[in-house]
């Protein structure tokens, strides 16, 4: 998480928070106010349990679709790890992120790469797609200035094959 700005008192959104491990890391790291959202009620229940165990008061959990989360220009940072591939209209959500992010805010998005790897595992997880670098950059650059992008865990592909 060293790639995130290290400023105190920031508003953070973890969009598609899953079971909540990232929520805890974000909320414990600084005096940040963290909002976490997911459509999966079981994931939110797990997040609530982790929040209680960590005794965090600066973490809010929301069980609803990202598209229904309404704050405008509220967040300094939006984190979205392995979420867009689950959303049929990913461009609509990227646009929504741009509306929720403060001017000069930071967004960090990770998605599965290499469409040629799309298979049963992706289908089983409810993925609509995997991304090429160009496809993702094309969608994101409509709404954001891209400062940095990279592949990670690419060295594991030979193991997967």
Image (cartoon, rainbow, N blue to C red):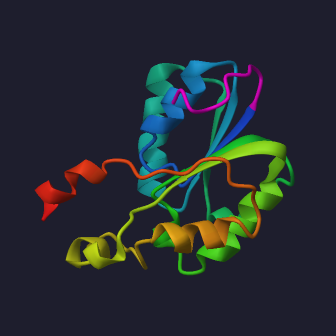
Would residue 15 appear left or right of 44 to someone viewing this image?
Answer: right
Q: What x and y, as percent, mark residue 4?
A: 61, 32
Q: Is residue 139 magenta?
A: no
Which residue is pictured at 45% across the width and 71% down the height? 132
Which stretch did the figure color magenta?
A: 1-10
Q: Is residue 8 above or below residue 59?
A: above
Q: What x and y, as percent, mark residue 128?
A: 43, 79
Which quarter of the image is occupied by the C terminus?
bottom left
Q: What x and y, as percent, mark residue 42?
A: 41, 54
Q: How many marks?
A: 0
Would residue 156 appear left or right of 138 to someone viewing this image?
Answer: left
**Quadrant housing residue 96:** bottom right
Query: Foreground: 7 or 152?
Result: 152
**Residue 70 seen in render:** no
Magenta: main secondary structure equals: loop
Would residue 93 appear left or right of 123 to someone viewing this image?
Answer: right
Which residue is pictured at 64% across the width and 72% down the height? 139
């Amino acid at each position: 998480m060293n790639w995130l700005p290290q400023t105190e008192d920031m508003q953070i959104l973890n969009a598609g928070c899953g079971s909540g491990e990232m929520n805890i890391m974000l909320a414990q790291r600084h005096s940040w106010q963290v909002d976490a959202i997911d459509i999966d009620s079981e994931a939110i229940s797990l997040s609530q349990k982790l929040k209680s165990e960590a005794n965090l008061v600066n973490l809010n959990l929301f069980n609803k679709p990202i598209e229904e989360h309404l704050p405008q220009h509220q967040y300094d940072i939006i984190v979205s790890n392995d979420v867009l591939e689950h959303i049929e209209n990913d461009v609509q959500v990227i646009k929504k992120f741009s509306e929720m992010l403060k001017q000069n805010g930071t967004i960090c998005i990770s998605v599965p790469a290499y469409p040629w790897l799309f298979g049963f595992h992706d289908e089983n997880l409810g993925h609509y797609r995997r991304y090429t670098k160009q496809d993702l950059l094309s969608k994101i650059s409509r709404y954001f200035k891209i400062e940095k992008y990279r592949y990670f865990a690419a060295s594991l592909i030979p193991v997967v094959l």
